[in-house]
Image (cartoon, rainbow, N blue to C red):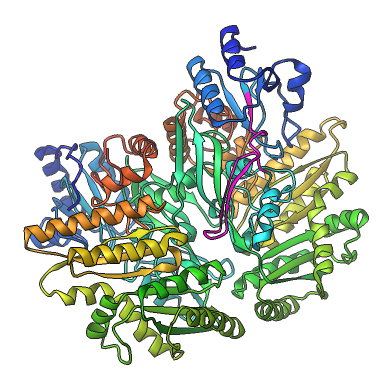
Amino acid sequence: MLDPIVHADLAAILPASAFLTAEEDTRPYECDALTMFRELPAAVALPDTESQVAAILARCHAARVPVVARGAGTGLSGGALPHHDGVLLSLAKFRRIVVIDPLTRTAVVQPGVRNAMITEAVAPHGLYYAPDPSSQIACTIGGNVAENSGGVHCLKYGLTVHNVRRVRGVLTSGEIVEFGGDALDGPGYDLLALIHGSEGMLAVITEITVKLTPKPQAAQVALAAFDDVTKAGNAVAAVIGAGIVPAGLEMMDQAATRAVEEFVQAGYPLDAKAVLLVEADGTPEEVAADMADIRTVLADAGATQIRVSKDEAQRLLYWSGRKAAFPAVGRLTPDYCCMDGTIPRKALADVLQRIEELSRKHGLRCANVFHAGDGNLHPLIFFDANVEGETERAAAFGAAIGELCIEVGGTITGEHGVGVEKLAQMCVQFRPAELECFLGIKAVFDPHGLLNPGKGVPTLHRCAEFGKMFVHHGRLPHPEIPRF
Amino acid sequence: MNAHTELRHARPDARSVADVVSRLCADFGERASTARAARDAHSHGEGMADAALPDVVVFPQTTEEVAAIVRLAHAARVPVIPFGVGTSLEGHVAALYGGVSIDLSRMNRIIEVNAEDLDCRVEAGLTREALNAGLKGSGLFFPIDPGADATIGGMASTRASGTNAVRYGTMRENVLGLTVVTADGRIIHTGGRARKSSAGYDLTRLFVGAEGTLGVITEVQLRLYGVPEAISAAVCQFADLEGAVNTVISAMQQGIPVARIELLDAMQMRACINYSKLEGFIEAPTLFFEFHGSAAGVAEQAEAMQAITAEFGGSAFEWATRPEDRTRLWKARHAAYYASMALAPGKQGFATDACVPISRLADCILETRADIDATGLVASIVGHVGDGNFHVVLFDPDDPAEREKAEGFTQRTSLRAIAMGGTCTGEHGVGVHKLAALVAEHGEAVDVMRAIKRALDPHDIMNPGKTVPM
């Protein structure tokens, strides 16, 4: 419940249809794509101008009311989970593509523009927006910046942070700021990078200048089958180690390919233990040269079968399976959760082996489908929330995968963000001095902790509590933290 | 030479400094020096003369030693200035308020090379040429090439780019992780071996480009690249500057993945022909190209490029496919700064560092050239124009009237770039010379930068007086 005066003030900023407080109106906003966590916000605000956003933030700031920004709600880590006493600030009405400038190859867009819409809008100029999260038909560019999203093609073309020139946003005080600029590089601290992946905890984004990429003249994908997951993992490292930079390098294990084949019939070999998709793009000559190298490396790595797409239709068919992996798995299990650990590529084969062991240990099935070229794993853990104890087992299995990724020198999240889901693993990945840096930066932007509270960065207190709960082998993590 | 912001920061009190100096001399023995020669050598980079002496120079060998130095300085509130090899052009290493210069040149090991992951971890004092020498035989290389043989730590701190940023990006894209000693002397690790991470705020990129004002970088995890199968370089000369610049714009718009494009104006070519004994070229606006890729890819890129140069009145390509010819060519480009200085012997040179969106490049360069000619200054234009970045090399004249002209010109160049949606520093960093321009460019965002500086370095001991006006 909002304080009645704050309520009245906020209601005065927006038309009645854009300020929702009745439960039947706020219910659709109770969670994002991490449906395990649900919370009703005190109110939902749907502004459509930057000055409305600034006014809402300033009013909430004065009254110390939490604000959670939301794009399309496709986030996988609970970053847009509402706050019970706060305002859920939806940017869904910021849907305008403001300027397309083919000369500088940039576009200015509002944060509620869907990722795929940018590519559609600029296609007549022979350009596209390169980062392509699998949810690109639904997810918004503002959410992509907040999570620093990746996608299949970020191996070659970079993450969101590499494809954005400028971000305009509103601070918790209501002040408007701009980070980055139209030139390639600017002076001073890299606030543009800082805002990427900040999960709505530093500022609310209102406008973004994205970089556009010329559409490659040609693209081909190779589909390679392996009779052993370890061989496939080693093949990934071999492709990269050979100095080839594929446009995409994806891997699926047998559990994933079987789920997909039933769903979309992409023509994947069902007897293979793992399938790799390796794409090359560029001019026809470059693609031909890269494909020849890719074939050689894959064959040397022990592929039992290699098929190269003959035309665009076949290329899209091969990709359709990968893109449909999540819904396909969704048909096989009542519930699943998607992990997001990222590891050095060299460790791929080893980590896959150990995930299989963990799967047996926790008694839950797991399908692997992921951005292998980046070493970004997406193990999908199958479980049934209606079976007593399975949700907890799935969470424990997920946490074990996260910690395994940290152990081999990786990170708990490559592209989905920490949100509420991975707060506890943050305490494992980072030491107090590092967490204090994060908290210091948070305090600079948001001294009262009003923007998306309880997400992204755990307090040292919380890590200490977490440490109490998970004492492994008599070893206490972070003995240097003050205990209570 | 720009109007420096007021010296807000008072010098630390003499007794604290004396205490820190004597402790460091005791702890580090001959690896700490208060000799005038050592302090002189650590009082300036290669930019304009604005030397400021540190009180002591220390040569640590490990991250732990750096942390111990910073803890000592932190307790006494004495400034700490990280020093690589002193190739900075913007006064980054001058000890404006005295204090401890931490010379990282003895931390020059390659810690590990992971060929399968295309990355490596090095100590901050390793120079880029030493890194590439160490990578010889591995089939890998580190492409970022700012000209000078700077240290990796210095390049990370200034977010350096260089002649091949069009293809390989800048330090922003190529630093995967860091070990940093914070202002209170703690050791933190940012980023890591993973190719991407969305865990926590992006501290790696915050420290990259922070110019030592938030912490001391002691180790750097870098992205490496496979040595391209084929490399070829070519030179093309133009009747006018406009033709050369329009060629670049057209190439960028067509997305030709040229590894390097460098523009040298007629004055710069004269300097390079004289200084580097380049034969077979005339004093005319010139583009240097380099193409990387498969043999077929390189041939294709070159063909596309030739079609564009012909359209804008460029000469036939002069090819350099043998490695030694290529080296000679790029040596000449890298020596451009020294070559220009040779045009005016005995004078101090300095370079501006403007960067504009590619669509405004022609306007900006042509207006800048006209501005130089109108002032009557001797100055040349040279730059990595593929990413919109160019430099004007000028001289620091003895004549006060002329000096004023030069200062006015430099100011106009920064403001012109900013007015065109660009920046006053594409790659050299802010240092002390561009503090005023930073405010012009960033407005409110400077407040945020200042607050970050205060949060991470509350006593303002990390390279004080640089990067962000406090």
Per the rendered image, the range of residues in magenta is A88-113
Q: Nearer the viewer, residue B415 or A465?
A: B415
Task: Judge left or right: residue A420 versus residue B416.
Answer: right
Percent position (x, y) of residue A244?
Answer: 62, 73
Residue B244 vs A327, above or below: the answer is below
Task: Judge left or right: residue A404 versus residue A318.
Answer: left
Residue drawn 24% across the image and 67% down it: B393
Residue A345 inside the magenta-drawn segment: no
Residue B459 vs B106, above or below: the answer is above
Residue A94 appears in which quarter of the rendering?
A: top right
Residue B224 in view here: no
Percent position (x, y) of residue A333?
Answer: 88, 42
Residue A252 appears in which quarter of the rendering?
A: bottom right
Q: Nearer the viewer, residue A134 or A120?
A: A120
Q: Nearer the viewer, residue A456 or B35?
A: A456
Residue B61 vs A479, above or below: the answer is below
User: Which quarter of the image is occupied by the C terminus of chain B?
Assistant: top left
Task: Judge left or right: residue B113 versus residue B361.
Answer: right
Residue A199 in view here: yes
